[in-house]
Amino acid sequence: MVWADGDPRARLMFVGEGPGAEEDRRGLPFVGAAGELLDRMIAGIELERGQVYIANVVKCRPPGNRNPEPDEIAACRGYLEAQIDAVRPAALVLLGRVAAHALLASDAPVGRLRGAWHEVRGVATRVTYHPAALLRDAGLKRPAWEDLKVVRDRLTTGIAAD
Ligand code: URA
C-alpha cells in the first residue's frame, strides 16, 4: 500500500491518482517520472517535497496502470478524507482528472475545473493537470505553472487570487 509522503503538518497538500510501478515498488507516492516533475514543480514554488504532503486517491496500484475503478475509489475515499482532515492544509492541489472527480462534485474536464478555487472538506482547493499529462503534452506546463503560482500566492499572502 502506498499511503503518503512529506510533512503531515504541511500547509500544502497534493492529491494524485494512484501508485504506478515505481511507487508500488518503493511504497512512496510520486517517485517515478511524474514524481520527478512534481518535485520540480514544488521546487518552482520554493518548497521541497519534505515540506508538503503528497497522497493519492487510491492507495494500491491498479493492475497494468489502468485508471482506478469507481469501487476502488470508493473503497479508498474514507482514507483520503481522513488524510485531508488530519493534515488540514491551508491549500489542496488536485492533480488531474481522477483526483478532481473523486473530491469535487463534478465530472467537468480539468481544463474547466482549473482556474478557480474550490472547497474540499473546508480546504481551499485548486485543480491542475497531472504531471504525467505534462510529460505527454508540454503545452500544459505553462497553465500548470500558472495554477501553482496562484497557490503559492495564497500560501504566502493568505489572499485568494484568481
Ligand atoms: N501518479 C499518481 O497519480 N500518483 C503517484 O503516486 C504516481 C504517479
Image (cartoon, helix red, strand yellow):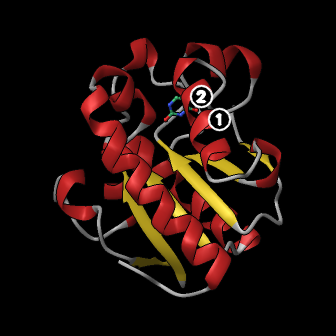
- Of the pair 82 and 5, the residue shown nearer to us: 5
Residue at image point 72% right, 69% down: 11
- Can residue 90 be seen in this snapshot? no
The three-letter amino acid code for the residue at tag 1 is Asp
Q: Could you say whether the residue bearing mark 1 is in a helix, strand or loop?
A: helix
Tag on residue 39? Answer: 1
Residue at image point 41% right, 18% down: 65
Q: Which residue is mark 2?
A: 35
Residue at image point 68% right, 33% down: 2
Can you give x and y, in whole percent of width and height, for residue 44 in the image? Answer: 61, 45
Of marks 1 and 2, the one in the foreground = 1
The three-letter amino acid code for the residue at tag 2 is Gly
- Can residue 116 be seen in this snapshot? yes
Residue 96, by quadrant, is top left
Residue 136 vertical placement versus 156 (above, below): above
Position of the C terminus by quadrant: bottom left
Some atom of ligand 1 lies within 8 Å of the CB belonging to the residue at label 2: yes
Query: Contact, CB < 8 Å: mark 1 with mark 2?
Result: yes
Residue at image point 79% right, 47% down: 6
How many neighbours does mark 1 have within 10 angstroms: few (below 14), some (14-19), or many (20 or more)? Answer: some
